[in-house]
């Protein structure tokens, strides 16, 4: 018996990543964080990995590099050495999504990663485009080389964390500014740097 058009179409969709009608409607779970002793646990790691459609080891390696720590995958969760605030993780995941998930051409998440002669490439199954994954270049490194505790920097507040802090970015760094609102341009003093997270205070 010949399959109907609808059955064939359904089968075809099952063989590719689930298409999203537009990038804004696609979402992934908010990270659930708990602190146990001197460790931080991301409880719903596998749920996030599933939504992003990425290799758990790849996302884990990203977290370890950005937070400057060690850790391990433990079932459905990951355990990270050190205490990290819950508000750190949503911006980190967004950075990962921007670099390794979202198509730069159509803005959709229907992509896959593969190696092409040692170059990591992101291919979009929605529009067919493909490109090398953009690395953070030396320009970013030069712009952030002088970031040290005590230095005063100027930031543009882009969003608000779940705790109400203003969130900005400097290169690969996520910057938290207490009481700041999106749209503000402020000068703040670096109080502490933890991995790729910068905590600030008023100068």
Image (spheres, rainbow, N blue to C red):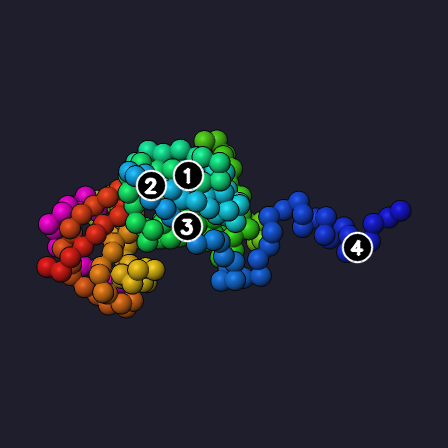
Left or right of 70 in this view: 153: left
Q: In the figure, is residue 77 to the left or right of 12?
A: left
In the rendered structure, which disc, 1 or 3, sits on the residue that comes first in sequence? 3
**How far is mark 2 from mark 1, CA to CA?**
12 Å
3D distance between C-alphas at marks 4 and 2: 53 Å
Magenta region, residue range: 144-157
Nearer the observer: mark 4 or 1; the answer is 1
Q: Looking at the rendering, in which quadrant would you find the C terminus? A: bottom left
**Mark earlier in primary sequence (4, 2):** 4
Report whether 183 appears left or right of 47.
Answer: left
Secondary structure under the numbered disc 3 in the rendered image: loop
Q: Is residue 158 above or below residue 9?
A: below
Which residue is denoted by mark 4 in the rendering? 5
79 in relation to 32, above or below: above
Circles 4 and 1, Cβ within 8 Å, touching? The answer is no
Numbered badge on residue 107: none
Residue 194: x and y in percent read: 24, 44
Assess whether residue 152 is covered by the magenta stretch: yes
Residue 113 lies, in percent from the top left, at 51, 41
Instruction: Determine which residue is flagged by label 3.
Output: 32
Pointer 4 or 1: first along the chain: 4
The kind of secondary structure element at disc 4 is helix
Q: Which residue is mark 2?
A: 36
195 lies above or below 181: above
Residue 126, how many percent across, how many down? Answer: 58, 53
Label 4 neighbour load within 10 Å: few <14, some 14-19, many 20+: few
Distance of label 3 from label 4 (alpha carbons): 42 Å
What is the x, y in percent for residue 1?
A: 89, 47
**Mark on residue 78?**
1
Residue nearest the viewer, comparing 84 with 112: 84
């Amino acid at each position: 018996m010949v399959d109907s058009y609808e059955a064939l179409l359904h089968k075809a969709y099952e063989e590719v990543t689930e298409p999203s009608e537009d990038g804004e409607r696609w979402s992934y779970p908010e990270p659930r964080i708990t602190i146990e002793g001197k460790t931080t646990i991301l409880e719903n790691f596998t749920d996030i990995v599933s939504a992003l459609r990425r290799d758990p080891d790849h996302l884990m390696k990203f977290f370890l590099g950005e937070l400057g720590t060690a850790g391990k995958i433990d079932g459905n969760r990951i355990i990270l050495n050190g205490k990290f605030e819950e508000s750190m993780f949503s911006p980190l995941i967004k950075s990962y999504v921007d670099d390794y998930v979202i198509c730069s051409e159509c803005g959709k998440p229907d992509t896959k990663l593969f190696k092409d002669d040692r170059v990591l490439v992101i291919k979009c199954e929605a529009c067919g485009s493909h490109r090398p994954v953009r690395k953070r270049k030396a320009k970013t490194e030069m712009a952030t080389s002088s970031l040290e505790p005590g230095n005063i920097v100027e930031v543009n507040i882009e969003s608000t964390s779940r705790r109400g802090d203003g969130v900005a970015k400097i290169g690969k760094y996520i910057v938290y500014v207490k009481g700041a609102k999106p749209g503000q341009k402020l000068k703040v003093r670096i109080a502490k740097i933890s991995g790729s997270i910068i905590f600030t205070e008023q100068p």
